[in-house]
């Protein structure tokens, strides 16, 4: 089974080449539960991606990175969305062609 980062990387590459896929993925942001809609869409395409895996992967990556610096004593504050692979993924999709969803334009 591939990890979350590998899945998101592959989806990003595919969406970069396929405007319809990009539109479909960006459309999940408009759902009442966008993370669930995104994961459901990914599973429909054959990617085993679940909400808690998506959320936890960023946190785990960030924690491991912090533990690996300065002998594990790193206590610097986390930047907003620094550990959020979901938001980073969509930020990169939106930058591909300047596409914006209503959800991101509100922020």
Image (tube, rainbow, N blue to C red):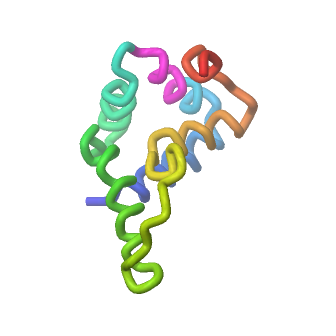
Which residue does the image show at 62% across and 43% down from the upper left? 92
Residue 15 falls in which quadrant of the image? top right
Could you say which is closer to the camera, residue 64 or residue 99?
64
Percent position of residue 62, x then y: 41, 61
Does 29 appear in magenta?
Answer: yes
| 90 sits to left or right of 84 | right
Percent position of residue 63, x then y: 36, 64
Could you say which is closer to the camera, residue 20 or residue 7?
7
Q: Give the quarter of the figure containing the C terminus.
A: top right
Identify the main secondary structure in magenta: helix
Which residue does the image show at 37% across and 74% down from the upper left? 67
Percent position of residue 77, x then y: 48, 57
- Which residue is at the far right? 98
Q: Is residue 63 above or below residue 47?
A: below
Percent position of residue 49, x then y: 30, 43
| 100 sits to left or right of 83 | right
Q: Is residue 61 above or below residue 18?
A: below
Does 101 appear in magenta?
Answer: no
For the magenta stretch, what is the residue range?
24-31
Q: Is residue 25 above or below residue 47?
A: above
């Amino acid at each position: 089974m591939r990890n979350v980062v590998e899945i998101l990387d592959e989806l990003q590459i595919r969406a970069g080449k396929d405007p319809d896929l990009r539109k479909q993925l960006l459309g999940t942001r408009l759902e009442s539960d966008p993370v669930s809609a995104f994961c459901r869409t990914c599973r429909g395409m054959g990617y085993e991606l679940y909400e808690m895996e998506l959320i936890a992967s960023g946190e785990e990556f960030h924690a491991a990175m912090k533990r690996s610096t300065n002998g594990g004593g790193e206590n610097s504050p986390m930047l907003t969305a620094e550990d959020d692979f979901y938001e980073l993924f969509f930020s990169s999709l939106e930058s591909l062609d300047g596409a914006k969803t209503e959800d991101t334009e509100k922020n």
